[in-house]
């Protein structure tokens, strides 16, 4: 199997909808897995240096997923060094003296496993997925790469060349240019302003010595924890814990304080217009606005309210007006969030804002009262849809640990969704979404050909 490098940008995808609206279901109540049964599937063990291992039982599966979480993420890195952690983790998985990169690729092909890394705003991860029978060999390989990386100059040069090509391509493409502008504009002066990937502004600041120094800062038992998904008996859990302890139990527990993440600032509201000739006759637009954080009491009602908004956008902006190829809502950020509206491939320019405002104002509270169970079911289904794969389950558990301090927190979200009332959803719509129709609540970023930029009514 090919080497897999997963690129997770902590919900930065511009043209994806809220996960809740991705699952289609009717008004029949969804039978979510019993929380009591699910909670019993979790076991947590600790090493002598404080590193924890959270096991999630996945009965009947022959697949093992291991994630090593490293606290901090891009928020712990200076904005001028955006991409450093991504580059570092890439090089870590390029092999050790015992397992050079060519040998890793050969083993991946022969044993059908994959290594992966990802960089997020508050945490990053390294890990692997393999067949259970190969776990010992893959764990040995993974551990040696993480603890004894080679950091070859040739690998560094190759990755920097690949990054240079990727940067040029991203800046040239309208969607890439919009993504970069959104990060820069929405997070100006905020810890989230540090990009996960290398940009043209940070490329020149990279060197291999910095990578090695940054790597050493990551090997801190205070910053590391593991999540493991598989069909584990108690004996296998104990055996795995011993193996992890033999490898990672030697790491020192050094002082570490997680970056303090303030609310995302919302100041300047004037639109940002970016000329991009590859856009042709289509506009790529996004607007960001205040919304509740993940732990806010308003978050679940807000999420449900955006599902109604997506339906209004589809009906009024895409189907009736034919103004865009697609339109949807989402969020960007990590623990702290900003709401996002994305208008993809806009053909209507002069009246686009007016059409968006009309859709927002078409909201009918009676619809919420009549259809709230249907939308609750969509939300609940989305909470459990990742569990269709072991890898998806691992990602969900990692998010639960990082954002809610508990591996099973996502199970308890079901209760929050079911408890949401129509009034709470309507109140959230009025508080966070209706003000979007006003001039001073949302900031728009427009990417289009230069000759078209003045046509927009934003």
Image (cartoon, rainbow, N blue to C red):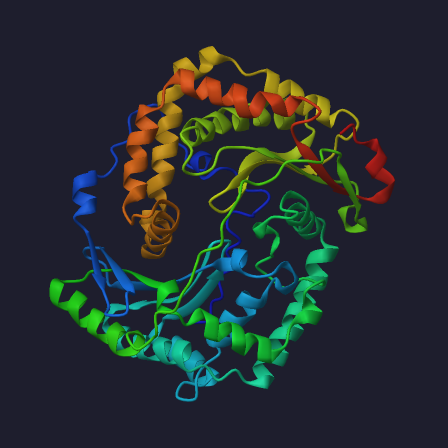
Against 308, is 49 above or below?
below
Does residue 386 appear left or right of residue 133 in this picture?
right
Query: Image quadrant for the N terminus?
Result: bottom left
Q: Quadrant of residue 374?
A: top left
Does residue 231 appear left or right of residue 7 in this picture?
left
Measured as percent of width and height from the top left, residue 233 is found at 13, 62
- Viewer-side residue, 206 vs 107: 206
Q: In the image as oriented, which residue stretches furthest toward the front?
A: 255
**Residue visible at 56% across and 24% down in the picture:** 433
Measured as percent of width and height from the top left, residue 411 is found at 28, 40
Does residue 341 appear left or right of residue 21 in this picture?
right
- Viewer-side residue, 155 vs 226: 226
Does residue 185 appear left or right of residue 123 in this picture?
right
Q: Quadrant of residue 224?
A: bottom left
**Residue visible at 47% across and 54% down in the picture:** 122
- Viewer-side residue, 298 vs 390: 298
């Amino acid at each position: 199997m090919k080497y897999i490098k997963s690129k997770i940008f902590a919900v930065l995808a511009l043209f994806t909808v809220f996960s809740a609206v991705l699952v289609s279901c009717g008004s029949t109540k969804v039978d979510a897995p019993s929380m009591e049964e699910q909670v019993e599937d979790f076991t947590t063990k600790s090493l002598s240096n404080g590193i924890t291992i959270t096991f999630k039982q996945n009965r009947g599966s022959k697949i093992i997923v291991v994630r090593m979480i490293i606290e901090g993420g891009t928020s712990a890195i200076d904005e001028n060094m955006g991409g450093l952690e991504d580059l570092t983790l890439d090089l870590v998985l390029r092999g050790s003296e015992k397992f050079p990169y060519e040998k890793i690729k050969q083993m991946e092909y022969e044993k059908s496993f994959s290594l992966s890394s990802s960089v997020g705003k508050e945490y990053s991860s390294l890990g692997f997925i393999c067949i259970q029978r190969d776990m010992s060999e893959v764990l040995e390989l993974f551990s040696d790469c993480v603890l004894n990386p080679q950091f070859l100059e040739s690998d560094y040069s190759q990755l920097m060349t690949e990054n240079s090509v990727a940067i040029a391509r991203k800046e040239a493409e309208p969607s890439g240019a919009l993504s970069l502008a959104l990060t820069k504009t929405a997070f100006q002066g905020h810890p989230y302003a540090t990009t996960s990937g290398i940009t043209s502004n940070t490329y020149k600041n990279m060197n291999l010595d910095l990578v090695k120094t940054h790597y050493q800062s990551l090997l801190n038992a205070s910053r590391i924890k593991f999540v493991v998904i598989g069909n584990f008996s108690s004996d296998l859990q104990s055996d795995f814990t011993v193996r992890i302890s033999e490898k990672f139990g030697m790491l020192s527990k050094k002082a570490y304080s997680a970056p303090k993440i303030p609310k995302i600032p919302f100041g300047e509201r004037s639109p940002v217009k970016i000329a991009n000739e590859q856009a042709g006759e289509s506009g790529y637009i996004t607007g960001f606005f205040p919304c509740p954080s993940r732990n806010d009491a308003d978050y679940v009602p807000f999420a449900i309210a955006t599902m109604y908004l997506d339906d209004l956008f589809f009906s009024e902006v895409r189907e009736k007006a034919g103004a865009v190829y697609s339109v949807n809502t989402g969020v960007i950020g990590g623990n702290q969030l900003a709401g996002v509206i994305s208008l993809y491939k806009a053909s209507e320019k002069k009246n686009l804002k007016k059409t968006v405002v009309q859709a927002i104002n078409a909201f009918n509270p009676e619809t919420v009262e009549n259809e709230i169970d249907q939308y609750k079911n969509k939300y609940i289904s989305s909470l459990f849809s990742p569990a269709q794969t072991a890898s998806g389950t691992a990602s969900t558990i990692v998010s639960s640990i990082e954002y809610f301090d508990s591996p099973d927190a996502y199970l308890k979200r079901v209760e929050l969704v079911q408890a949401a009332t129509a009034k709470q959803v309507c109140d959230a719509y009025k508080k966070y979404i209706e003000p979007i129709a006003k001039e001073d609540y949302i900031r728009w970023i427009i990417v289009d050909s230069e000759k078209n930029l003045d046509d927009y009514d934003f």
